[in-house]
Amino acid sequence: ASHFLLTTNDKTVKLWKLAERRKRASGFNLRNDEGQLVDCNSLEMLLVPRYRLMEDMVVEPVCRRVFANAHTYHINSVSVNSDGEHFVSADDLRINLWNLEVSDQCFTIVDSKPANMEELAEVITACEFHPQSCSQFAYCSSKGCIRLCDMRSNALCDHHSKIFEEPEDPSTKSFFSDIIASMSDVKFSHSGRYMLTRDYLTVRVWDVNMERRPVETYAVHDHLRTKLCALYENDWIFDKFECAWSGRDTHILSGSYHNLFRIFDRATKSDVTLEAARDVAKPGQVISAKKVVSVGGSGGGKRKKNEINIESMDFNKKILHPAWHPERKDRKSG
């Protein structure tokens, strides 16, 4: 069976067909089994190529379509429609709607570019189609709000149907407030009832029927609040972390620094911190939980084996793009 994969770089989206191959053709006349050309004058007889069974299965990618020349700014997200025929691609100022069968034409459904670029107040950071309603989609911005739009109302969805935003507490406002409030990802739950968003320090769960505030808030790396100045000076504060739902929407996954990722249980409100390392990536091996502590360890004495000192964290190692296995609840990747 073949599967299709949609990928993007800064400006171009590509549609790939992935096929599993257990057989390959061999016995060519002008090429040997390694694919090297042979001298046609040395041929003594005409060979008929045949398919032979391979020892290992090979996944063969084939690029089917290229969707290019539609974005002025870097693409930050792509999302496939539930009808299986369309997808959207979003950059800082525009969201384009494509048909998977047409690669040379698209329609702009959101255009937030002001007439004067000096008046630009926010940019689009991520976009996601509703998993069930093919006419609805949501996108988040650098201002920390999510807009829910319906393509049935207007061809150009500059006017949203709902906006989700949590009022900021004036007592906690600081120089970094606008930066850490910028949302870097939005994901609909599989049921379509909730939306999951990620800003720099937290992940939030929103009910699509309640715009005033999120119904759940989880701190991903709250221990970094005292390090915002250093993070700003090294540009780490601008890192864009993504988030993911488990297959049954019961757990939430998001990444952090030092190759750490957090899993939150929505029912018990418990969480666990795990490290993605090569020495624990063996099949069937259980990953032990980690804990980030301040200087001196959690007990004030010697640091335990499962503890990571906040001062020794490697901020160049980070998990930005986590994903949950669609069927198995114990499998994640980043």
Image (cartoon, grey):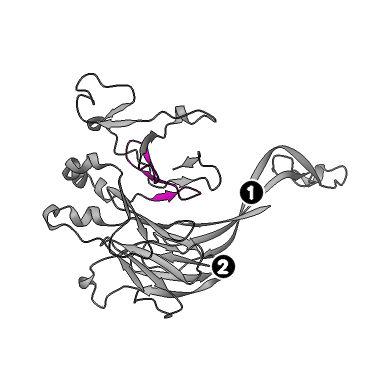
Left or right: 220 as drawn, with respect to 34:
left
Amino acid beneath label 1: Glu
Q: Quadrant of the C terminus?
A: top left
Classify 303 as above or below 51.
above
Name above or below for residue 299 compared with residue 55: above
- SS of the residue under disc 2: loop
Quarter occupied by residue 38 = top right
Q: Amino acid at mark 2?
A: Asp
Query: Range of the magenta residues?
Result: 242-269
Q: Nearer the viewer, mark 1 or mark 2?
A: 2
Question: Does the magenta run of residues contain 190?
Answer: no
Q: Is residue 257 magenta?
A: yes
Q: Residue furthest left?
A: 171
In the rendering, at what x and y percent does residue 254 appear? 38, 45
Query: Is 269 in front, or is 67?
Result: 269
Query: How far across and how far down the image is residue 52, in percent?
Result: 78, 41
Task: Look at mark 1 in the image and give the residue it sits on.
Answer: 60
Does residue 244 appear left or right of residue 231 in this picture?
A: right
The earlier-in-sequence mark between 1 and 2 is 1
In the picture of the structure, the residue carrying the numbered disc 2 is: 83
Q: Which element carries disc 1, helix, strand or loop? A: strand
Q: Where does residue 127 sit, x and y in percent of width and height?
A: 40, 63
